[in-house]
Amino acid sequence: MRRGLAVVVAHPDDDTFGCAGTVALHAEDPAFSFVLVHATNGEAGEIADGSGATRETLGAVRQEEDRRSWIALGRVPDRHEWLHYPDHGLADVPPHELAARVAGILRESEPEVVITFGPDGVTGHPDHIAIGEATTAAFHRCREEGLPGFRRLIHSAIAQRTLDGWNRQLVEAGKDPMDPTQLYVPRGVPDQTIDVDVDTSDVAPRVLAALREHRTQQGGLQDWSEEQQLEAVSHERGVIAWPEQRRGRGVVRDVFDGLEGQGRPVR
Ligand SMILES: [Zn+2]
C-alpha cells in the first residue's frame, strides 16, 4: 500500500515536535512519501542567545534550521511548501483562503494520512488553531471530492498523563509547573481520547538531533536533562479526527495502522 503522509503546521519546529519520529520510522520504506507544509516562516518567534539571528533575519534562519533538521533526522520531505503567511497572523487570514491554499497542495499529493493541529493547538497558539482548522476543512473538501487517499486525519495531541509527568519533573527540579490555561503553554487531552500512540524511542536520538537544529528555539529545552529530552520525544500521539472513532477500540501504533489492504498499490 502507498503510505503518503502530509503534515501541515504553522511554524518551523512544529513539524519536528509533531511527526519527526514517525517519519524516521518510515525513512527506509519505499512506499512512504512525505509532504510538509509550513504556513509561516516563524519570523516572530524566540531568538535564543548566541543563535546569531536578528528579528530581520529570523524567518530565513528558521527556514534553514528546518531544512537542516530533516537532514539531521535522515529523511527529508519529498515536497516542502512554505505559504509565507505572517507569523502570529494566521488567525487574521480569511479561513477559506487558508483552506484553499492547503487543499491545493493536498490535491496534488493525495496523501493517505494528514496530520495537523486540533482545536487545542497543542499550546493554544492562535496560529496552530488556525492552520489546524484550515487543514481539517481542506482534508474534508478533498475527501468529499472523491480523490484517492484522504483515509485518516490526525490531530497532534499531548496526553494529559504526559503533561502531568512533565509537571512532576519540573516541580521536583524546584521549578514552576506549566499552567495549561495560559497561552503558548502545552496542554493535554484526556488520556482516553488518544487514538494514535507511536513509540518513537528507537529513533529518539535522531529526533533530538533534528530538534537541536532549531538553534533559535532552544530556550525551552534548557530545563530538561538529556534523558528527559529523549523521553519527551519517545512518543508521538494524536487524536483521529476522521473517520469517527468508537471509544474503547484501542490505539493504533503507527499512523498508517489499520489502513492496509484497502489502499492504493505503490505505483
Ligand atoms: Zn508553532
Image: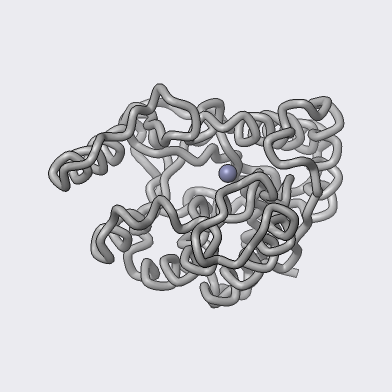
Q: Measured from the top left, where is residue 166 in percent x and y?
A: 26, 43
The residue positioned 62% from the left and 62% from the top of the image is: 1
Query: As drawn, is 186 to the left or to the right of 96?
Result: left
Q: Locate ligand 1 by image quadrant.
A: top right
Which quadrant would residue 34 be assigned to in this image? bottom right
Depicted 123 relative to depicted 7: above or below: above
38 and 115: which one is in front? 38
Residue 233 position in % (x across, y down): 37, 57
Colouring rule applied to residues: one colour
253 over 267 or under it: above or below: above
Residue reaching furthest to the top = 181
Kindly identify the residue that appears in the image at 43 percent across and 53 percent down: 219
Residue drawn where x is 74% and y is 55% of the image = 56
Q: Nearer the viewer, residue 114 or 224?
A: 224
Rendering quarter of residue 129: top right
Q: Residue 107, position in %: x, y?
A: 83, 47
The structure residue drawn at horizontal position 51% and vertical position 61%, both measured from the top left corner, is 20
In the picture, measured across the screen, residue 136 lies left or right of residue 243, that is right
Front residue of 246 and 181? 181
Q: Could you say where residue 95 lies in the image, as x and y percent from the top left?
A: 79, 26
